[in-house]
Image (tube, rainbow, N blue to C red):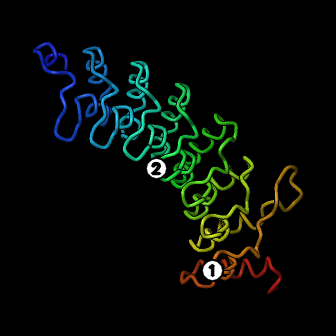
Amino acid sequence: MVDVLLRAGAKVNAVAQDGLTPLHIASQQGHADSVTQLLQGKADPSIKDRLGRTALHWAASSKGEGRVVDLLLSAKANPNATDNEKKVALHLAAMEGKVDVVTSLMSHKAKGGAKDMDGSTPLHYAAAGGHANVVSALLRLLNNKGVDERNTWRKTPLHAAAEKGHDSVVVLLLEAGAKINNTDQGKDTPLHCAARGGHQEVVKRLVNWGHGGHMGRQKKANLQATNNVDKTPLQVAESGDMPQHEEIVTLLMRKMFLIK
């Protein structure tokens, strides 16, 4: 259908009111054949819509297959083009947990440590989304660089994973050398974040990390760390109202030898 329209003289780079071109829409919907025909008809992959997004942004975040991303990259789409929020395609792929797209973008010189307007990197988004496979791929491709990168709120990817309760991601980040006692803007450590969220498995993981003589494991979680309202992780858990908070309180009190 696309080639019929192009042969009939349809404008390949026609822009709709929302700034979307046919290439944006085909990329958004994951239509590889349409994307191929549009690119052959000289569609421009660098055009941005009203959100500042290129076709590559949409392809990276869509439910479509990764093949569209590869087609756009082969057509010299810029992997480091930023939208109005300073997000690159890699941010969106990481957010959606699309490991194949992340790998393709990185192999085409996408900047793995790119920061959006909130100062967050793709690793922050992959960690917050619990996308362990993407976190693993980014850490491997970046040689663990950026594992302690901070966003505007001074949160590291470990904070992001801990506050959402993603245990498998917490393990990957700690194994990559993430500092267990980094503090954010509110002086919360990842343990504060996990305790507040009622994430028992993550709390357990953090308080037991570094025990058992594992070679190369860095400092243990500081159970006495106080945030900017002078609360320890235990006190943060005590003010929670879910059953998990009670279990976390018991766990932390045992660790601190306050109860048997």
Helix, strand or loop under label 2: loop
At horizontal 76% and vertical 73% (from top left) the residue drawn is 223
Left or right: 63, with 214 as reference point = left
Q: Residues within 10 Å of mark 1 (few under 14, many from 20)?
A: few
Quick one: which residue is furthest to the bottom in this view? Answer: 259
Residue 193, image x, y percentages? 61, 68
Name which residue lies at 40% across and 24% down: 77
> At 46% from the left edge and 50% from the top edge, which residue is drawn?
117
Picture layout, residue 136 above or below residue 162: above
Mark 1 or mark 2: whose residue is earlier in sequence: 2
Which of the two residues, 63 or 95, is positioned nearer the viewer here? 95
Q: Name the amino acid, label 1.
A: Val
Check the picture and name the quadrant holding the C terminus.
bottom right
Residue 237: give its label. none
Q: Residue at x 58, y 63 (%)?
A: 165
Q: Is residue 45 left or right of residue 66?
A: left
What is the number of the mark on residue 229?
Answer: 1
Q: Secondary structure at mark 1?
A: loop
Quadrant, the N terminus: top left
Q: Residue 25: which quarter of the image? A: top left
> Marks 2 and 1: in contact by CB < 8 Å?
no
Instruction: Report x, y in % for residue 75.
Output: 39, 18
Toward which corner of the image does residue 34 lie, by quadrant? Answer: top left
Question: Few, some or many C-alpha atoms within 10 Å of disc 2 (few <14, some 14-19, many ≥20)?
Answer: few
- Residue 202 position, x and y percent, is 65, 64
Relative height, residue 166 to residue 197 (above, below): above
Q: Quadrant of residue 214?
A: bottom right
Please name the amino acid that badge 2 sits on. Met
User: Which residue bears the numbered disc 2?
Assistant: 117
Residue 11 at x, y = what percent?
16, 21
